[in-house]
Image (cartoon, rainbow, N blue to C red):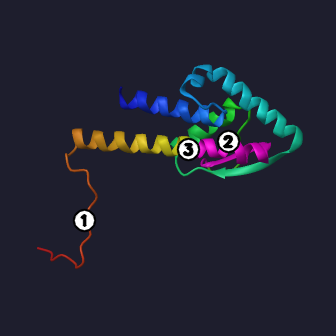
C-alpha cells in the first residue's frame, strides 16, 4: 500500500470516527455517515443559534483543508475585506464547531502535516542530498577561516 493510499485510508477512518462510525465496515457507508453529521449540525443548530467565529490558519494546507471541511458540512466560509488570507470566518452553531468541525479538522490537519513532512523529506533526500537532518547545535562559536 502506497503512502498516499495509507493517508487516504487514515483520513477516511478519522472522518468515520467523527461521523459516529465505529468499525472499518462502516467506512463503506461514508455517504450515510456524512448525512448523520449534517443531521447533527441541523440538530445543534436548532438548539444553538449560529455564531460568527474567526479562525487563523498557520499555513495554506491547513486553510485548504479547513475550507473543504466547512463546505462539506454545508457551511460557507468567508473572510472580510482586508482580512489576511490565513483568516477564515464561519457562521455555525458553536456546539457543532466545538464537537465536530474543530476536532475533525485538528486530527486531519495533524495527519496531513505528517504526510507532507514525510514527502518533503523523501524528495529532499532523493533529489537534493541524502542527509536531510537538522543542523547540529554547537556550544561555542566556530572559528572563521
How far apart are labels 3 and 2 at the CA level?
10 Å
Which of the two discs, 1 and 2, labels the residue nearer the N terminus? 2
Farthest left residue in view: 145
- Dot 3 corresponds to which residue? 107
Query: Quarter holding the N terminus?
Result: top left
- What residue sits 25% from the left and 50% below the top? 132
Q: Quadrant of residue 40?
A: top right
Residue 2 in view: yes
At label 3, counting other C-alpha atoms closer than 10 Å, the crowd grade (few under 14, some 14-19, many 20 or more) is some
Residue 104 in the image: state x and y as whole percent. 62, 41
How far apart are labels 3 and 1 at the CA level?
31 Å
Residue 139 in the image: state x and y as whole percent. 24, 77
115 relative position to 20: left or right: left
Span shown in magenta: 85-106
Q: Quadrant of residue 99?
A: top right
Q: Residue 101: within the magenta? A: yes
Element at badge 3?
helix
- Dot 1 corresponds to which residue? 136
- Dot 2 corresponds to which residue? 101
Q: Residue 29: within the magenta? A: no
- What residue sits 24% from the left and 73% below the top? 138
Q: Quadrant of residue 39?
A: top right
**23 and 73: which is toward the camera:** 23
How far apart are labels 1 and 2 at the CA level?
39 Å
Amino acid at each position: 500500500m502506497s503512502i498516499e493510499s495509507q493517508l487516504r485510508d487514515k483520513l477516511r477512518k478519522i472522518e468515520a470516527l467523527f461521523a459516529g462510525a465505529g468499525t472499518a465496515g462502516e467506512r463503506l457507508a461514508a455517504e450515510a455517515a456524512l448525512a448523520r453529521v449534517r443531521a447533527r449540525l441541523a440538530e445543534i443548530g436548532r438548539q444553538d443559534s449560529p455564531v460568527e467565529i474567526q479562525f487563523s490558519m498557520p499555513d495554506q494546507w491547513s486553510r485548504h483543508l479547513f475550507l473543504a471541511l466547512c463546505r462539506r458540512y454545508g457551511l460557507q466560509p468567508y473572510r472580510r475585506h482586508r482580512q489576511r488570507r490565513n483568516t477564515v470566518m464561519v457562521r455555525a452553531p458553536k456546539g457543532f464547531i466545538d464537537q465536530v468541525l474543530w476536532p475533525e479538522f485538528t486530527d486531519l490537519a495533524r495527519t496531513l502535516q505528517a504526510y507532507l513532512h514525510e514527502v518533503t523529506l523523501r524528495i529532499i533526500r532523493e533529489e537534493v542530498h541524502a542527509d536531510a537532518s537538522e543542523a547540529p547545535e554547537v556550544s561555542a562559536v566556530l572559528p572563521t577561516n
